[in-house]
Image (spheres, rainbow, N blue to C red):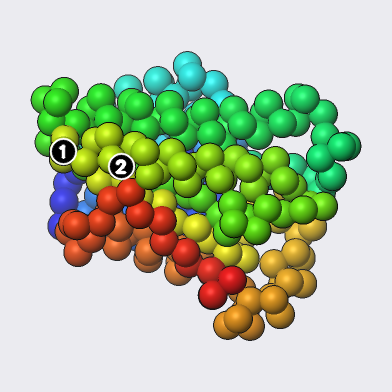
Amino acid sequence: MTDKVVIITGGSRGIGRATAVAAAERGYRVCIGYASNEAAARGTVAAIEASNGKAVAVKCDVGEESDILKLFKAADKFGTLGALVNNAGIVATTSRVDEMSAERIQRMMAVNVTGSMLCAREAVKRMSTRHGGMGGVIVNLSSVAAKLGSPNTYVDYAASKGAIDSFTIGLGYEVAGEGIRVAAIRPGLIDTDIHASGGEPDRAHRLAHMVPMKRIGHAEEIANAILWLMSEEASYVTSAILDVSGGR
């Protein structure tokens, strides 16, 4: 058990919400970042508080550096940062690369890559023993799309997650001697509403037959893996990427 703070970006719904609830159950004070759905964020906070946990929600578009700084300042007031879960991410509608606009690609990278890197930057400033911190854990959310490439669907999203894989490995090596562990989860087809953002709300169910386990995953299954990486049970794990994909 711990009374340290975990920041979870995109923490109002789906994998973020499941992770927030699970972290609170393990004693973390949870600081949830949400881009726009205030009602969902408040609902997650209420669910945590109903079980005697502590949580706060902060509006934060990780595509904006100023919002990230506000999120971390709010977390500073909430307690000592012990973990960051870089969960916020976007996907666009199904498209070939030769149909993508510059604005779409730039927004994809701003949120999925730059936002995660800036959040990690702020976490390292607070957790690294080099900066007087007490250590901590950073868990990045990648995707099996990083391996598959997502042709004819969203290559830009896949590329952004490939960047997250490289970032996880490099940052992990960089801060391994400073009390910080860095790892990533690569979810497969998970039952969340991110598919609706891409214009295919039934995509996960439609492609379930392609998964060796013949089913889609659930947000709680990803949250369990994230919480394991955050725990002392994973104390010798860093610069590692864990597939939670049913074998896909």
| Number of numbered discs | 2
Describe residue 160's horizontal placement relative to residue 15 as left or right.
Answer: right
Closer to the camera in the image, 174 or 197 = 174
Q: Name the residue: 44% across, 31% down.
A: 117
Q: Is residue 223 visible?
A: no
Q: Secondary structure at mark 2?
A: helix
Closer to the camera in the image, 65 or 13 = 65
Q: Which mark is residue 186?
A: none
Q: Which residue is mark 1?
A: 177
Q: Is residue 240 above or below residue 10?
A: below
**Residue 25 at what x, y percent from top left?**
28, 60
Q: Is residue 208 visible?
A: yes
Q: Which residue is mark 2?
A: 172
Describe residue 148's horizontal placement relative to residue 220 as left or right.
Answer: right
Closer to the camera in the image, 84 or 193 = 84
Q: Is residue 168 above or below residue 211?
A: above
Q: Residues within 10 Å of mark 1 (few under 14, many from 20)?
A: few
User: Hey, what amino acid is under mark 1?
Assistant: Gly
Residue closest to the far top: 66
Describe residue 38's horizontal placement relative to residue 119 as left or right.
Answer: right
How many angstroms separate mark 2 from mark 1 (CA)?
A: 9 Å
